[in-house]
Amino acid sequence: MLQIDQVWKDLEALRLQTPLVHNITNFVVMNNTANALLAIGAAPVMAHAVEEVEEMVGIASALVINIGTLSPAWIEAMEKAMKAAAAREIPIVFDPVGAGATTYRTATCRRLLDAAAPTIIRGNASEIMALFDAGVTTRGVDSSADGTDAKTAAEALAKAYDCVVVVSGATDLITDGERHLLVLNGHPLMPRVTGLGCTASALVGAFAAANPDPLLASASAMAVMGVCGELAAELSAGPGTLQLHLLDTFYSLTREQLAERLK
Amino acid sequence: MLQIDQVWKDLEALRLQTPLVHNITNFVVMNNTANALLAIGAAPVMAHAVEEVEEMVGIASALVINIGTLSPAWIEAMEKAMKAAAAREIPIVFDPVGAGATTYRTATCRRLLDAAAPTIIRGNASEIMALFDAGVTTRGVDSSADGTDAKTAAEALAKAYDCVVVVSGATDLITDGERHLLVLNGHPLMPRVTGLGCTASALVGAFAAANPDPLLASASAMAVMGVCGELAAELSAGPGTLQLHLLDTFYSLTREQLAERLK
Amino acid sequence: MLQIDQVWKDLEALRLQTPLVHNITNFVVMNNTANALLAIGAAPVMAHAVEEVEEMVGIASALVINIGTLSPAWIEAMEKAMKAAAAREIPIVFDPVGAGATTYRTATCRRLLDAAAPTIIRGNASEIMALFDAGVTTRGVDSSADGTDAKTAAEALAKAYDCVVVVSGATDLITDGERHLLVLNGHPLMPRVTGLGCTASALVGAFAAANPDPLLASASAMAVMGVCGELAAELSAGPGTLQLHLLDTFYSLTREQLAERLK
């Protein structure tokens, strides 16, 4: 089970440090990802030119790579940034958006994972299963499977790349291949907002900058995501207002709210 | 006149099928378009790399092409995707954002329309008139003319490309060159939110995936757009909150609300 | 001190003229920038292809250049657009996002400033200091310094490029190298929303289209930004809802609200 003391300590450390999180992410979610990082207490920067990614990684505390709207020039920048982050030993979060939907996405994921092993991979069950077994196909960028359905794939992937794998879903599964943590918080309205998986990956990056244990950092990030999602959903008439209330809740989340909700 | 039974049936079919809608659209509206599709009950995917668009079209139920922030690499991907969609006989919606504002936009529209005739073209009156007559100029991406002002252009365009043309405005005109439908719903605050025309095009794509008659599908989409806009505007103090309430209303629209408002 | 009569006159002129503002800006803020321009009463257009920027500048009343997510093709388009705007003598606003964070950003700023001197440069204190002295470094895209800290740099930059420099912060400093105006309005929650500096630059562009004196136009824009930020913050539980209430407030701002708040 998750410990409230650990989650709150990680959030307080994040808020105190305001880590600079360098994101190379997709066009759909950039605004919302930046706002989520600002709201939770981190400092976002988005930069994708091959001419500057290594230097930007050089001042960042974490790197978040998200292939949602990939193209050749961006992939080259992602590879450069991941290698630079690995050399500096700052945490790398990798989000394989739509892996399994096209061969280009699956092949790009393998290329990037082989270029520099990430600290943490976060995806939905379909994506994680597609990374593990190229025969699995994904319908677009959404998953119909739950986080726990991808347990075997997640464990194998974690061992293959010596990293933590976060499979998000109604229940989130977090594993380093040996240990497992489950996050039971969240709300069914959340998948009706685009890019909340991408937001989760960005938060994982911010928490990983604040806690050097990637398993615990990932669990804290996913717990905050789930609890804030519940609080925001209760204020919202639909997915439009949920997106905004979620940002407000990231900003204002208290220890009491977290303690009351954490499952 | 529009029939409530038809519009509601189309919306129910859409919600039941959650069609995957592949969008190659502009940077300004991507987040909001994806959220609109999720809220109405469809599944959005954004992918623009020439390396993957054909494969992504292969799993999609509709393709929406929007040239709002065009550039050569994107146009090449749009052309590939349109040809693949035409080959698969899935509906193609084409949104000629800013046609008439620059020669590059107008020429790009002609190139894409000639590469693969869309199922439905949706634009504002200036854009539709510019597609019909290259001598018409548009001031940026907004139209000062009403949907019905472009009737002649819309009919000619529909016949030339054997497609349905939707001209949006205070009154929306939908025609296949012979038949005409008018949608009278909507709210004057809607043009103060960027990209609601793009949202309309995306909804047209989702409805066209659910109803094989593009004239009826377009009318249902525009009716839902207009009714939800009215409902959302009544909850909103300005265009900022309107954008979010519109998403909430897409998500929660009932048959009763539709029946009460549909003109 | 700022004169309410001047600020209100500029806002009324803007609303009457609905100037077309051509933005070449970053992916993170495009939606919000377009919405801010629509809400305040301007007409936004986003276009970045080298094939069309000169023609789009040809129908615009102001050009806003923002390097937030720069890459070579975009820089080439920015340079072309700036030269075309200079030739047409329409106002150019330049926003050096992240200048000082990487050498690529700082070098790009110098290249663009040398290609065509802008009418107005708007940045935070770190960015303005980095433009003045290449030895100054910026942590990502945020500034820890206040607007007035960059007074020496702002004055020198204004003289070097014969332009107005706006340094935003808790206090905004506006100078042409000789004269100085301070804007004291604003709210501490505003920096927790991404891209409000970019929004400020876009508003400066819209006001510069409506008032040919760039010093006064900039001050009016920053005053409206600050007052609306205060009004919106009082309605908001956090940065998520602030972003939307700010747009509503741009749309509905009255002379009475402005008079009551303007410092």
Image (cartoon, coloured by chain):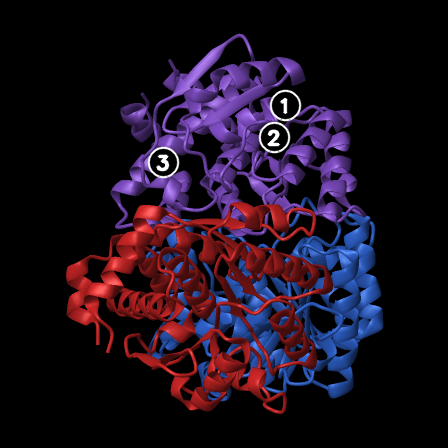
Chain colours: A purple, B red, C blue
Q: Mark 2 or 1 closer to N-term? A: 2
Label 2 to label 1: alpha-carbon separation: 6 Å
**Amino acid found under the numbered disc labelled 2:** Val
Q: Secondary structure at mark 3?
A: helix
Horizontal side of C113 relative to B123 (left or right) equals: right
Q: Is residue C94 visible?
A: yes
The residue at which mark 1 appears reads as A119
Say left or right for A31 vs C96.
Answer: left
Give the labeled residue for mark 2. A93
Q: Which mark is residue A228?
A: 3
Q: Nearer the viewer, mark 1 or mark 3?
A: 1
* Subunit under mark 1: A
As helix, strand or loop, the secondary structure at mark 1 comes to loop
Image x and y of residue A212, in percent:
60, 19
For the point 69% across and 76% down, the residue is: B104
Q: How many marks?
A: 3
SS under mark 2:
strand
What amino acid is at disc 3? Cys
Label 1 with label 3: CB-CB less than 8 Å:
no
Give the percent coordinates (x, y) of residue C114: 84, 70
- From the image, which quarter does the C terminus of chain C lie in? bottom left
Q: Position of residue B124 (x, y in %)?
A: 47, 79
